[in-house]
Image: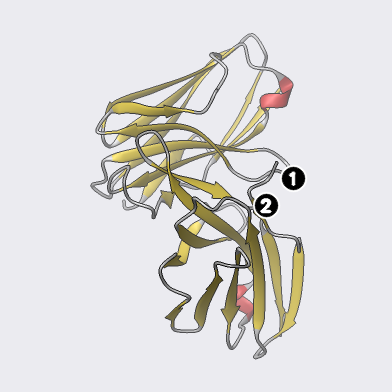
């Protein structure tokens, strides 16, 4: 398998649930990103990891908790989410955090009830 | 306030004709610009990019033009094909605290009519 793979593709959760989104890249990249795309809004950067270290957190609420165990894997742990957190969550990777071109996964469509 | 704007939510073009997608930006710190293409149920796919030191970059049927003084860029697709029907996102890059950060527009949905 090549590219950036995200699982699950769809997720429905209640506000009291805890769930995790997974991203895996097979491109040999060193930087990984989480984006959020809400309806009628542009993609918004959430987190950046470079060589497993978090380098950016764009004022994301603590109910979103990222984890990057190695350069190939990225997780987004979710707990006590709100209905307004329903969105498409996209993972991306690049050769390094100093590279402009990012490669995206297909995303996880999250619905919070 | 949106720093990258794609003012046309949609565009319809006849097959074989030229498609022109536009993008405006406000932040003078942006120094690299990208276009992504997105099909339904897939992630955005990198299409073409341009550095701020250039005013044109061409790759096959796709050409991106940059007008720095007007803070405007455009993507030209010639000739347009039905398979080009997708949502096109403009993105601009600037160096953040430790990494380049992409700021995206809302996208323009292109429909190429056979």
Q: Out of B50 and B28, give the one closest to the viewer.
A: B28
Residue sticking out furthest to the top: A16
- When the figure is inspected, residue A13 is found, relative to residue A86, above or below; the finding is above
Name the quadrant containing residue A39: top right
- When the figure is inspected, residue A34 is found, relative to residue B33, above or below; the finding is above
Q: How is the image coloured?
A: secondary structure
Chain hosting mark 2: B
Chain hosting mark 1: A
Give the labeled residue for mark 2. Answer: B106
User: Is disc 1 placed on a helix, strand or loop?
Assistant: loop
Residue A40: numbered disc: 1
The C terminus of chain A, quarter of image:
top right
Asked if marks 1 and 2 touch (Cβ < 8 Å), the reply is: yes
As drawn, is B49 to the left or to the right of B1? left
The residue drawn where x is 55% and y is 67% is B68
As drawn, is A49 to the left or to the right of A64? left
Please state the total of marks drawn on the protein image.
2
As drawn, is A94 to the left or to the right of B11? left
Residue at mark 1 to residue at mark 2: CA–CA distance? 7 Å
Work out whether disc 1 and disc 2 sit on a shared chain. no
The residue drawn where x is 48% and y is 75% is B55
């Amino acid at each position: 398998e090549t590219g950036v793979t995200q699982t699950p593709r769809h997720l429905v959760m209640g506000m009291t649930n805890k769930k995790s989104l997974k991203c895996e890249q097979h491109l040999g990249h060193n930087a990984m990103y989480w984006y959020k795309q809400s309806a009628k809004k542009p993609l918004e950067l959430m987190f950046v990891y470079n060589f497993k270290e978090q380098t950016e957190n764009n004022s994301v609420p603590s109910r979103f908790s990222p984890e990057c165990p190695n350069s190939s894997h990225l997780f987004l742990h979710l707990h006590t989410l709100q209905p307004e957190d329903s969105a498409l969550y996209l993972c991306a990777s690049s050769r390094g955090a100093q590279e402009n071109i990012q490669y995206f996964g297909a995303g996880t469509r999250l619905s919070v009830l | 306030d949106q720093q990258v704007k794609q003012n046309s939510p949609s565009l319809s073009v006849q097959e074989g004709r030229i498609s022109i997608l536009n993008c405006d930006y406000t932040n003078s710190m942006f120094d690299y610009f990208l276009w992504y293409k997105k099909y339904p149920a897939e992630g955005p796919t990198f299409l073409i990019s341009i550095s701020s030191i250039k005013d044109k970059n061409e790759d096959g049927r796709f050409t991106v033009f940059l007008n720095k003084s007007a803070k405007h860029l455009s993507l030209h697709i010639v000739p347009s094909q039905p398979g080009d029907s997708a949502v096109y996102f403009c993105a601009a890059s600037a160096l953040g605290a430790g990494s380049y950060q992409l700021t995206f527009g809302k996208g323009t949905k292109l429909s190429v009519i056979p």
